Image: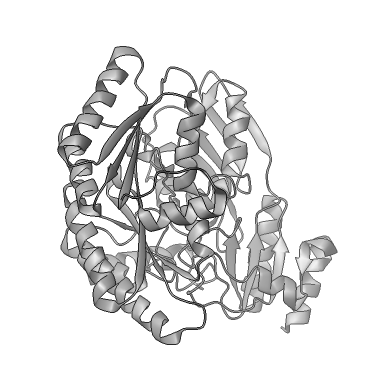
Amino acid sequence: MSDDDVAAKLRLVLRPDQVLTDPAERDAYAHDDAEWAEFHRPVAVVLAETTDDVTVVVRTAADAGLSVVARGAGTGLSGGANALAESIVVSLERMTRVHEVNVSERYVVAEAGLINDDLRRAVAAHGLWYPPDPASYRISTIGGNAATNAGGICCVKYGVTRDYVLGMTVVLADGEIVHLGRRTAKGATGYDLTALMVGSEGTLGIITEVTLSLLPLGGREERAVVGSFASLEDAGVAVAAISAAGIIPSALELIDAMCLNAVDEWQGLGLPRGAAALLLSTVDDPGATGAEAAASVARHMTDAGALAVDQAVDPAEIDRLFLARRLAYPALERLGPVLTEDICVPRAAVPEMLGRIRDTAAAHDVVIATIAHAGDGNLHPLIIAPEGDAAAKARAKLAFDRIVEDCRELGGTVTGEHGVGLLKLPGARAELGERVLAMHRDIKAALDPRGTLNPGKAF
């Protein structure tokens, strides 16, 4: 079946404006934000509006011998949503409806294309809160968050996407629609197929709707503790000490000087200058408990050699400081193509890993800026290479691989929240081992024997 025949078949069932075939339009949907991952121009792009639309795409692709790559907003950083040769991209960006907010049972049912921040606002109107908050929460979709098991800033205390997914609607590789999971607080019926789908990166099924558990919006009193440090290692020592003391902050974020400067020069936020690193911490326990926890965090920062430690309770000031963390990646993108790491090491290994990242930058003559969800050991070294400099790009790739190896040597995992996609396939192979990889292949073969859904990704 020719490309034109595929598009014509799709248009017989879907509206013409849902099927994009113009080369420029197809190119716009060909890749996510992982600029260095391989991608191809898809045969067509379909803007699905219902679960049935996704079924049409999957069945049409299977009949034509094509693969299907699902995407939300395309904010991924691992190449998981990159189009393959001979593929149809199905975008769920138009599927943004909130079907139910159940206040008494504390859950929400929403379509996969809903933006994370829009979901949070929708449930906040009912006095409820959805905690997972990836840095891209204003532009990433809840379905994409589920497909990659996205984390975020407050996940050190409140957990990642998987911890909140109760159930979902999924289109399987044969086009069948299944409803997984539950809407009750507990459930132990059958294998946990919902958890299997979370983080599967569209390789086992396409998530079109999710049921998410929620928490009460009130009851927290946020206090920020901000420490500046002369070195990344000193900041890492503070992180390890806070963790060892049993303190569970609601956020503990690290930003190095390069990130701070890039954000401030771009946005003019009046951020602290002159330090090698900034640790941004919040505690949200109410009353005296929260005040005591904040004081303890401040004490551990001081003991680790902080140049200065300040506390803030004004919500506007806290938002301004954390905006710097959320804007770090786009600020660095303005300096050149960014190769993004997403390693996670034991909290106690954070100081050692930060030192190894510094040494890797020197050894390979590359620029590496670092941001981190330091409270759970999830580090994001950002390797920057000048546009068009092939030699610098080659050195950056070597540095990328070295960081992955160092992470594994320290007992870490090659991806904490971005997913394997294409960029982390070698690291995932080394981490999982051949027998576990064989288990992955067996599961894939059982659910997608023809390899229709996002083949070659995730493992």
Inspect this view and state whether residue 60 appears: yes
Q: Residue 279: which quarter of the image? A: top left
- On the image, the x and y values in percent for residue 445 come to 42, 68
Q: Is residue 114 above or below residue 291?
A: below
Q: Residue 31: which quarter of the image? A: bottom right
Is 56 on the left or on the right of 373, as rendered?
A: right
Is 243 on the left or on the right of 66, as rendered?
A: left
* Residue at figure coordinates x 31%, y 65% from the top left: 439
Q: Nearer the viewer, residue 456 or 288?
A: 288
Q: Nearer the viewer, residue 431 or 274?
A: 274
Inspect this view and state whether residue 430 appears: no
- On the image, the x and y values in percent for residue 365 come to 31, 77
Q: Is residue 227 above or below residue 49?
A: above
- On the image, the x and y values in percent for residue 104 come to 53, 18
Q: Is residue 190 above or below residue 328?
A: above
- On the image, the x and y values in percent for residue 14 come to 80, 61
Residue extending farthest to the front is 274
Q: Is residue 227 above or below residue 359?
A: above
* Residue at figure coordinates x 49%, y 71% from the top left: 337
For the C terminus, the image quarter is bottom left
For the N terminus, the image quarter is bottom right
* Residue at figure coordinates x 22%, y 68% from the top left: 359
